[in-house]
Amino acid sequence: MSIKSLVSLKPLLVKCVKFAPLKVLTALILMLLSSVASGVGILLIVPLLGAVGVDMGGTGVSSGVAQSINSVATNLGLELDLQSVLVVYLLLMIVVASLSFASTVVSASLRQSFVMQLRNELSRALFYTQWKYLNREHMSDFLRLLTSQVQSVGASLQLLLNLTSSVILVLVYVGFASLLSAKLTVIALLCAFALALLLWPINRRIHASGRVGLNANRNIHRSIFDNIGSLKIIKSFAAEERYLSRMESTSAELEQQQIRMAKFNALTRWVNMVGAAIIFTVLFYSAIQRFELPIANLLAMLFIFSRLMPQVSSIQSTIQNLIHQAPTYQDLMARSADLKQWSEACGSIGQSDAPQFQESIKLENLGYQYMDSRGAVLDAINATFKRNQTVAIVGPSGIGKSTLADLISGLLEPSSGQISVDGCAIDNGNRLAWRSRVAYVTQEVFLFHASIRENLIWVCDQSEYESNATLERELWRVLELAAASEFIKMLPQGLDTVIGDRGVKLSGGERQRLALARALLSKPDVLILDEATSALDNENELKIRNALVKLDGELTIIIIAHNETTIEHVTQRIVLGRRK
């Protein structure tokens, strides 16, 4: 399972290479140069000291290198002494540090660019996913997808880069070590392999821990999302402790998983430390008693292996972290595949692509069935909406009035039948464009934590207005139509008043009228109001009704309402009967 987990991360590396091949190549080259320079620095310190007369004893590779250095220095007319040798070594280490710095910066740039690109791709896929898929999913899963999961994938990419760097460095160290003593190097590799086999069973448990962590993270995000969103109702029922208890239980599950992972990491470090001590003992004994390695070579070997073992430990730790994070990446890829599967047809989504609504909208044998395979919500609906006509859709609760509104607006695709505008069928090719010509006001109004002005203008193309003054006049015009101008003028900062999260600083009636004004500002061909007045008092409901009466004949309006007061002026009605 642990091998499969690592292999499952291969698409991540491939995707990264395709995303920024030049950056990846630069990062790899810098890693290689840094590793080689570091290895050269370690290898040369002993022969360099020998080159200035420090007697390290013995003969071999290091003495040969020392002779070569002396020969080069003589040819260049340079005099080697202790100070010059140390300066050369210091300069070499500065080069190593500089290459390491550049490698870190390039890797960080690559990671952040890739994370941003991945988040943008997922955001685009999410925004253009069919509503019938989104409507069945928990929205906190998408929030987690675009935040913590994307960051986790970025961390996995960084781990892959670190793993690559460590492997390159280890290969360089092993190469230089084999020059000093091939036999000792083989013994060291065999010991390291045995150590890796000893730790391998832990990796399988780490993968299982990663799956538990993924589920725990999903649950904690859902709990927080639900509880924060319903904080007012929780407080109104004095149910704080009940919901806090649920959150604490979910947090405890996540805490236990993280402690479990910490134990695995601690155990791995313990095994690596003990294993490193055993390997050092074996190597030192073999070098002195079996191979009679010269002191110069022995010192170089010990220095190399003192740098090598932390890298081997780092590789093992990195592999474990990758195995632990693999389920998160697999879940992200599965979610990404779902979004692509349920993607809407995308193209140029300008308003000019929408069917031209000049005469009527026709519903022909329209039917819809939800994805959970329960009975059809709507079946064989036939109706016609004339341009600039107000139509009411009425019927008992649960009969499918809101579903019909979703179909007309283009949020949902019919299971059977079709919707046509002036004879042009609404299909995957023009459904997005048609939505741009429909304004939809629901019972639950969403407003941003921003000013009234900002909550209005995001639905319109500001470039269509000659000046800010023209846009300002249009804002007040639609506010007047929606019976919202009066209360806004009474606010201390008028249009620049910040209305709080979801418009909490406004009353229900004020929020509804502001939503109606926002809808009108988009200059729609069709305005749909779905139970937009059901939660209002008589006074606010009357204001909304009067606003709708003023708009009657100005644009096509479809009203879904239970209260007769809201639709008493409407002559054409579609009555949905009870399902059998």
Image (spheres, rainbow, N blue to C red):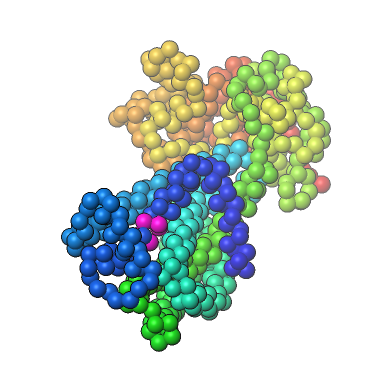
Q: In the rendered view, tell whether residue 427 sits above or below residue 237.
A: above
In depth, the one of 262 and 545 nearer the eye is 262
In depth, the one of 31 and 440 nearer the eye is 31
> Is the magenta region chiefly helix, strand or loop?
helix
Q: In the rendered view, tell whether residue 395 sits above or below residue 523.
A: below
Residue 8 in sight in this render: yes
Q: In the rendered view, tell whether residue 484 sits above or below residue 180.
A: above
Q: Residue placed at 53% from the left, 51% from the top?
A: 145
Left or right: where 431 falls relative to 458:
right
Residue 543 in sight in this render: no
Rendering coords of residue 189 (x, y %): 50, 74
Left or right: where 382 falls relative to 235:
right
Q: In the rendered view, tell whether residue 3 sits above or below residue 501.
A: below
Q: In which quarter of the view is residue 176 placed?
A: bottom left
Q: Residue placed at 57% from the left, 65% from the top?
A: 211
Q: Residue placed at 65% from the left, 48% from the top?
A: 338
Q: In which quarter of the view is residue 245 placed?
A: bottom left
The quarter in which the N terminus is drawn is bottom right
Rendering coords of residue 315 (x, y %): 47, 66
Rendering coords of residue 13 (x, y %): 55, 51
* Residue range (magenta): 35-39
In the rendered image, residue 37 lying in the magenta stretch gets the answer yes
In the image as oriented, which residue stretches furthest toward the top?
466
Disc tally is 0
Rendering coords of residue 390 (x, y %): 65, 23
